[in-house]
Amino acid sequence: MGQVPYKKVLMHGFVLDEHGKKMSKSLGNVVSPEEVIEKYGADVLRFYLLWASKPWDDLKFVWDELLNVNKMFNILWNVYVFSTTYMSLDEFNPTKITEKDIILRDEDNWIISRANTLVKEVGEDLEKLSFHKATRKINNFILEDLSRWYVRLIRGRTWVESDDPDKLGAYYSLYTAIYKLISVLCPIAPHVCEEIYENLVKGVDENAPESIHMLDWGYDESKIDSDLEQKMDVVREVIEASARARDIARYKLRWPVSDITIVSQDEDVLKAIEELQDIIKDQSNTKEVLTAAEFENLSFNAKPNLKTLGPRLKGDMGIVKKYLEEADGNLIKNELDDTGKFTVEADGKSFELDDGDILFDTELPDDFVSSEFEFGNVFVNTNVTTEIKQEAMARELIRRVQDMRKDLDLDVEANIDAVVSTSSEFKELILPQSEFIVNEIRARSLITSDGKECLDCEDVYTKDWDIEGEDVCISIRLVQ
């Protein structure tokens, strides 16, 4: 008694149709909550209403936007299934893990930092009633940080032995990220978060609270590393630029390259690349990561600046133009950089040109392709050496075997016997990669033979493939 009934009040806007018109039965544009819940569930609707617009603004209800939110929840569920599938196979229990049991890589510390940053920032947004900001940060974390980046980074680590400290570090970090995520998502999407909590947390920790809604809301400030988060942003841009460069050259992502060179004038960018180059190597599929302030292999072609030279040279423009086009552009640029002047002597005449009188086009070596990112350029070396060709063909073969495993709906842990029949040339390419292939396809044995005949047995699955113009017959059999 004697106290105000509430401390804050927020008046929401109206819900309109996608054209901004008021919903009315006479217009036939009414969307009932029951209709949405029946199709997509209450969690999707709750999240969408908070995510789509500022809470005090009118909301245009757009079905396509609702579908995007539903897709986000499907992606979250897929990450959860991925996590629990591998963790259960290895009987991973985070409550029994100590710091001595795990190895945390930079990407592990990054996702733990991002998860704690998320809890902190979402809490601040909810306190300010900025529900749209909170939900958009959650959306970005699920789609960009967790699914498209971290799970992609650790997928290969989930295939090694169950007690490997590096693998356990990935499990621990993924568990922590999901745990932190559902703790901030549960007020908005209580049903799916409770389901994840019951299996992921309660399933391994009998002392955990009965419900996720009984958890304390908190984050660990000591686990937040803003500097690492910024460096990872740089790395992600570099990797995206590398992928764009490959696309320009039509060079497959699964094929390795011998090196990529990142050129930037920003020392902090170069430092970030140096510290996180292992991630760049892995995700850019490159043998070496180089950094530089300038790309030394660039060639320069000189040409006259018509705006400045035209009025001065008039009829002599042709003489200067021809000279610059035939001269070594690199030498001209070096002299301009050193002295700010360059003298053209041709047809018995002499012309002194300033720095602004000459323009340069850059030309890459034949085996290089480049793409820009916010802080510089990425140059990808696409020269295919024998070693590169061997690994590339091994990866092509692995992809086909993995497709065949999917056809048979084999468990991720299932072992197979494999036979590859192909030409002697293709055989010579993949033989040096045999150990790599065996590990990737989970083969107990791998037999390669010359010829085109495939095995024809009752328990053997056989398929013919065309791999880069080579006829390859692959036979696999489940090891019982």
Image (cartoon, helix red, strand yellow):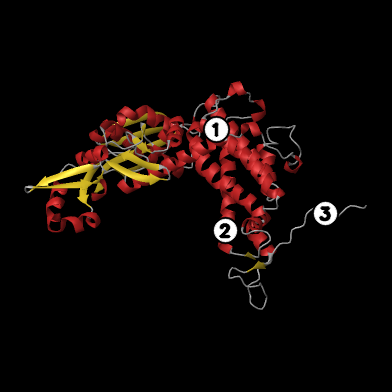
Where does the image place residue 209, in percent across and percent down from the top left?
Answer: 76, 37
Dot 1 or dot 3: first in sequence order is: 3
Quarter-of-image position of residue 333: top left
Dot 2 or dot 3: first in sequence order is: 3
Image mark count: 3
Residue 456 shows up from this direction: no
Residue closest to the eye, 332 or 98: 332
Three-letter residue code for mark 3: Tyr
Three-letter residue code for mark 1: Asp
Label 3: which residue?
A: 6
Label 2: which residue?
A: 67
Q: In this view, does 302 lie to the left or right of 376?
A: left
- Seen at 66% across and 71% down, the residue is 30
Label 1: which residue?
A: 108
Q: How far apart are marks 1 and 2 (CA)?
A: 31 Å
Residue closest to the eye, 247 or 233: 233
Badge 2 marks a residue whose secondary structure is helix
Where does the image place residue 399, in percent across and percent down from the top left?
Answer: 39, 40
- Seen at 67% across and 28% down, the residue is 95
Where does the image place residue 142, in percent across and percent down from the top left?
Answer: 57, 46
Residue 354 shows up from this direction: yes
Q: Which residue lies furthest to the top in this view?
A: 100
Residue contact between numbered discs 1 and 2, judged by CB atoms under 8 Å:
no
Where does the image place residue 401, in percent across and percent down from the top left?
Answer: 39, 39
Three-letter residue code for mark 2: Leu
Badge 3 marks a residue whose secondary structure is loop
Q: How crowded is mark 2: few (under 14 residues within 10 Å), some or many (20 or more)?
A: some
